[in-house]
Amino acid sequence: MDKRIVKIEEIKDNEVFVNIFLEEIKKIQEIPKMPKCEFLHIGVTSTTQVLGEKIVDMLVVVENLHEITTFDEKRLNNIGYHRIAHNGIKGVIKYARIIDYLTMSYDVVLNVVQRDTEIHKDFIKVREVFNNEDLKNDYNSFKKKNKDLSFKDYSAQKIIFINKMLKRIENND
């Protein structure tokens, strides 16, 4: 099996990604009996002038994470989403729209979290990275430095980096 490759590129214009985000919300909202959700476009495709993978990251906020049942998972499967590993992040259920099953590459990720939990608050805080030029520059430096790592190593480094950024944001550093 081929391995998933991390492809870091500059996001100069995000209009196509915003449109994908809006289209996916519509698809999910049309699923019968899905729990009520709030959707936020997060990650690099939600902004411009940053480095990252061209993957639309969506934060899907539900009132109770246990509302996402096996039936909801099957309905998400029907519109092309499949549950993926959450890489050790507790309190999040991740689904991806797979575009290549050999490499397990995807173009949209749903990060389902419960409202007002620590992980929900952390996702919101990390959005601040793109509003602060120093943090944004550090983010771009991280991406440049780690772009040649394997997916597994890149994912591990990314979690460490995000935790450092969260601390900086909390300390107004």
Image: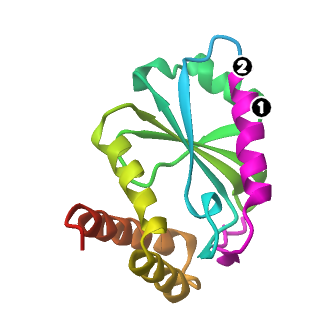
Residue 93 in picture, x, y percent from top left: 48, 38
- Magenta residues (range): 1-30
**Residue 162 tag number:** none
Provide residue 9's location: percent of width, then percent of height.
68, 78
Marks 1 & 2, CB-CB < 8 Å contact: yes
Q: Secondary structure at mark 1?
A: loop
| Residue at the image position 49 percent from the left and 74 percent from the top | 154
* Residue 153 in view here: yes
Looking at the rendered image, the quarter that the N terminus falls into is bottom right
* Left or right: where 33 falls relative to 18: left
Secondary structure beneath dot 2 equals loop
Whole-percent x, y for residue 134 in the image: 40, 80
Tag 2: amino acid: Ile
Q: Residue at x 69, y 28 (%)?
A: 28
Q: Nearer the viewer, residue 107 or 19?
A: 19
Q: Nearer the viewer, residue 106 or 144?
A: 144
